[in-house]
Each structure stands twice: as C-alpha cells, then as structure tokens.
Amino acid sequence: MKTFKLVGVQVIDDHLHRQQIPLIDGLIINKEDGRNRWLVETYIDKQYEPLFAKLQRSQDEVRLEVTISHTGNDPAYMLATIHSVTSMKEHISVLMEGLMIRNRTDLAEIVLAGLVEKGLQGEALLKEFKHELHERRGMKWREPVKVDQATKG
C-alpha cells in the first residue's frame, strides 16, 4: 500500500454541484489490490457530520473529487462509500473506501463542458474557463492586465 497526503476533497451531488470540504488533515491510500481501490481518511470540522452521517446511512456511492499531494495537481475522481464517521471534540474523522475512476475525462474538458452548458461564449467563456480551471487546481488566478498598444514604449 502507498500513502499520500490528501490536500483537497469535494463531494459531488446528483446535480453535479460540488461542495468543497475544508480539510484539517487527510490521507489517501492506494490499496494496490489490483482493483484500483483506495482508502480516504479526512479530518474535518464537526459541522460536516450531518452530511457524512446521511451519506453513510444511505449506503449509496458518493462521487468525490480528490486532490493528492499538492494543490496544483489535477483532481482525481472517485466513487466511494462511507465506512465510518467518528466524532471527536470539535472535529470528525471520515473513513471512505472507493474506486479511482481512471477513464475520467480530462479536467479541462469537464470545466469547458460545464461552462458551455451555462451558455457562455467568446471572451466570457475564455475568461471563466481560465478562472475555473485555476480554481479547481487550487491555484490563485488573476485576470491578466491588458496593455494598450498606444501606451507601449
């Protein structure tokens, strides 16, 4: 088994809305079982206990977007089940097991498809695409400053 630092996790609902779960700490472990199964443990604020308790009770698979090792890495996609939600004083530990989805569409294609579905076109599409791609990769994005050709020296 190989263990990696988990630096980001989002829960994706049936309407493809993403809920960012701020991590206090997290690990993701490749079980190396030949079936591409992974263990995910998150240490998060107690305010998320109702969400994860509900997901555990439903026993349905949960779609996750996880970022491993560094916030600049592209997220990976998983289908996971909640094994346990352990309550602590001000935090909870959530243990999940899931399947890493290898045949995922490239992150850029996912972002672009979502923006096109929202009806964006032209410059607005390009601007929002760059912004959202950077945001999903956990990087700060600033719109480039446009230099007026007349003021170039």
Image: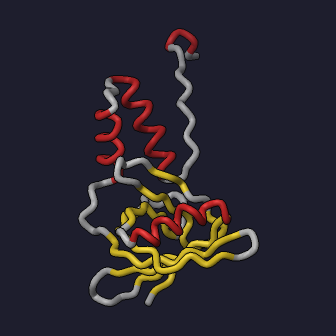
Measuring from the top left, give residue 22's x and y in whole percent: 61, 59
Which residue is pictured at 46% across the width and 86% down the height?
Answer: 2
Q: Determine the residue located farthest toward the left in the rendered image.
A: 103
Tag count in the figure? 0
Image coordinates for residue 16, horizontal then vertical, percent: 37, 49
Q: Which residue lies at the image location 60% right of the left edge and 61% below the top edge?
A: 48
Residue 152 sits in quarter: top right
**Residue 122 on image: x %, y %:** 33, 23
**Looking at the rendering, in which quadrant would you find the C terminus?**
top right
Outermost residue on the top side: it is 150
Along the viewing direction, whichever of 33 and 109 lies nearer the viewer: 33
Name the colour scheme. secondary structure
Q: Residue furthest right?
A: 89
Name the one closer to the observer, 139 or 92.
92
User: Residue placed at 43% from the left, 90% from the top?
Assistant: 1
Q: Position of residue 99 (x, y in %)?
A: 33, 75
Q: Is residue 54 above or below residue 34?
A: above
Front-lying residue, 79 or 69: 79
Q: Measuring 57% from the left and 12% from the top, which residue is drawn there?
A: 151
Q: Quadrant of residue 49?
A: bottom right
Above or below: residue 29 compared with residue 44: below
Left or right: where does residue 109 sit relative to residue 10?
A: left
